[in-house]
């Protein structure tokens, strides 16, 4: 069969790699892809938001299955565009991807269906938001309603910061129309865990847990990023936590979406905070995490194409999802300056060191071929150096060892990915 993957990051690289292991698949295309993806898939120069040309490509090339990795096209309705032409596609429709596309929607859903989350208020007027913030408890959290590359969340320690935050989001429109509505949310404390799941509209199957490192700098300092590294499984995701989430969060979310007439098919990514009062939902995403997918999928035993098809066909209850009892760590090599300004176009050296090494992966995020055919940096997050090990300590040592094998000018990484496992 022929598969098309939509996206161009490290997440799409690991998805293509995992699909390439399916005996059912003869050919993989990725639009638009990147330099590393071209080792496992044929990259097609069509942008992820160009639905008309993606649909045309799928029809012209007899694509049997399309898998959408990114949030923007999902929230924009790419699945509806493919389905309208009778094409098979993995991902939520627009009316379900709103679970990620609107924080106001997801907060209201959780409130209505008693799914544990931080208390909140929603505002469409900056004056009303400011009035509320005059009598709030601090710290407090402001969130742009819409998609903002994971950066539309402001943690405000003082009233002054909160007032400034309202100005940034609602008046200066730092994240465009994403800030037309804002959610003002109670500040929660605790460890964060990422839990990815497959959903077929009715049934939900949980993948192994992961832990992200969102801040740019060591010690969780600096600005929020898309994620600077990850490990799986999270030792903080205990059986007790799992039991609680199964009882109050996972199936409850799937059932709530169904009751709202928005059945969800695809991946739900639960961003959880393990608070002193129990697990609460920080946010939902309607897709695999990046780099969560890079540490979860190498540990998955199943043929991923079977799982994608079961989600589309509503037969996920027949799938026994299985993960190894190994561990995986991904350290992101970024361009110095990310998530703000950074330079790109630097040649990347040493990639061949990852060839034929079973436990080591070099997933490409922001890379491309330059005019001379050399692989160069082309984004903030450049590479995900990933290693499997017998446990987290082993995987972490291997991943950090491998970060030395590859080099480029302006290479930047965190040195404490997985440090928290030393302080359990
Ligand atoms: P989100 O995009 O909603 O996951 O927010 C990005 C990051 O901001 C999260 O991963 C948390 O680290 C932090 N954050 C979001 N909401 C809260 C909250 N209510 N309390 C504390 N931290 C939060
Ligand atoms: N790493 C967090 C995300 O994919 O949203």
Image (cartoon, rainbow, N blue to C red):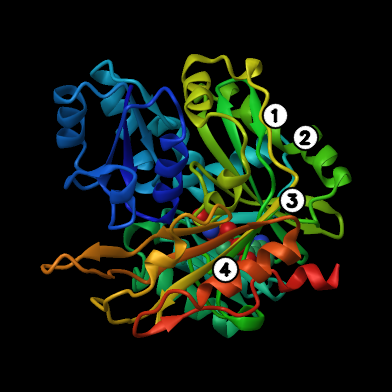
- Depth check, mark 3 against mark 4: the one in front is 4
**Foreground pick, 25 / 108:** 25
Q: Quadrant of residue 50?
A: top left
Q: Which residue is mark 2?
A: 246
First along the sequence among labels 3 and 4:
4
Label 2 – label 4 distance at C-alpha? 25 Å
Residue 269 % position (x, y):
58, 44
Q: Is residue 141 above or below residue 110?
A: below
Q: Which residue is mark 4?
A: 214
Residue 405 % position (x, y):
47, 74
Q: Is residue 258 left or right of residue 85?
A: right
First along the sequence among labels 2 and 1:
2
Residue shown at 42%/69% (left/top)? 169
- Depth check, mark 4 against mark 1: the one in front is 4
* Cβ of mark 1 under 8 A from ligand 1: no
Q: Residue furthest front?
A: 356
| Image mark for residue 280 | 3
* Cβ of mark 4 under 8 A from ligand 1: yes
Residue shown at 18%/22% (left/top)? 59
């Amino acid at each position: 069969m022929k598969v098309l993957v939509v996206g161009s990051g490290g997440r799409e690289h690991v998805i293509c790699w995992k699909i390439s292991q399916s005996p059912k698949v003869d050919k993989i295309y990725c639009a638009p892809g990147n330099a590393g993806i071209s080792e496992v898939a044929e990259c097609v120069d069509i942008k992820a938001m160009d639905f008309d040309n993606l649909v045309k490509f799928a029809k012209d090339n007899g694509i049997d299955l399309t898998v959408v990795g990114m949030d923007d096209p999902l929230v924009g309705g790419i699945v509806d565009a493919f389905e309208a032409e009778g094409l098979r596609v993995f991902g939520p429709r627009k009316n379900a991807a709103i679970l990620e596309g609107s924080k106001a929607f997801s907060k209201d859903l959780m409130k209505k269906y008693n799914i544990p989350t931080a208390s909140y208020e929603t505002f469409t007027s900056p004056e009303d938001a400011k009035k509320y913030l005059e009598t709030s408890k601090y710290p407090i959290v402001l969130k742009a309603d819409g998609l903002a590359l994971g950066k539309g969340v402001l943690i405000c320690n003082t009233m002054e910061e909160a007032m400034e935050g309202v100005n940034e989001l609602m008046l200066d429109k730092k994240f465009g129309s994403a800030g037309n509505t804002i959610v003002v949310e109670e500040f929660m404390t605790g460890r964060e865990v990422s839990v990815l799941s497959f959903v077929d509209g009715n049934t939900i199957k949980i993948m192994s847990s992961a832990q992200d490192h969102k801040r740019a700098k060591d010690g969780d300092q600096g600005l929020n990023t898309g994620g600077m590294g990850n490990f799986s499984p999270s030792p903080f995701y205990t059986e007790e936590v799992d039991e609680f989430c199964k009882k109050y969060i996972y199936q409850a979310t799937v059932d709530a979406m169904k009751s709202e007439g928005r059945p969800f098919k695809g991946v739900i990514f639960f961003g959880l905070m393990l608070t002193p009062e129990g697990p609460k939902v920080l946010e939902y995403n309607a897709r695999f995490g990046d780099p969560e997918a890079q540490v979860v999928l190498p540990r998955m035993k199943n043929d991923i194409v079977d799982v994608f098809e079961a989600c589309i066909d509503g037969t996920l209850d027949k799938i026994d999802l299985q993960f190894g009892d190994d561990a995986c760590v991904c350290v992101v090599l970024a361009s110095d300056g990310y998530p703000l300004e950074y330079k790109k176009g630097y040649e990347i050296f040493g990639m061949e060191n990852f060839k034929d090494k079973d436990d080591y992966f070099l997933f490409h995020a922001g890379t491309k071929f330059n005019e001379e055919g050399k692989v160069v940096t082309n984004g903030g997050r450049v590479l995900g150096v990933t290693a499997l090990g017998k446990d987290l300590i082993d995987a972490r040592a291997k991943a950090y060892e491998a970060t030395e094998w590859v080099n480029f000018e302006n290479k930047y990484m965190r040195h404490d990915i997985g440090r928290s496992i030393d302080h359990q």
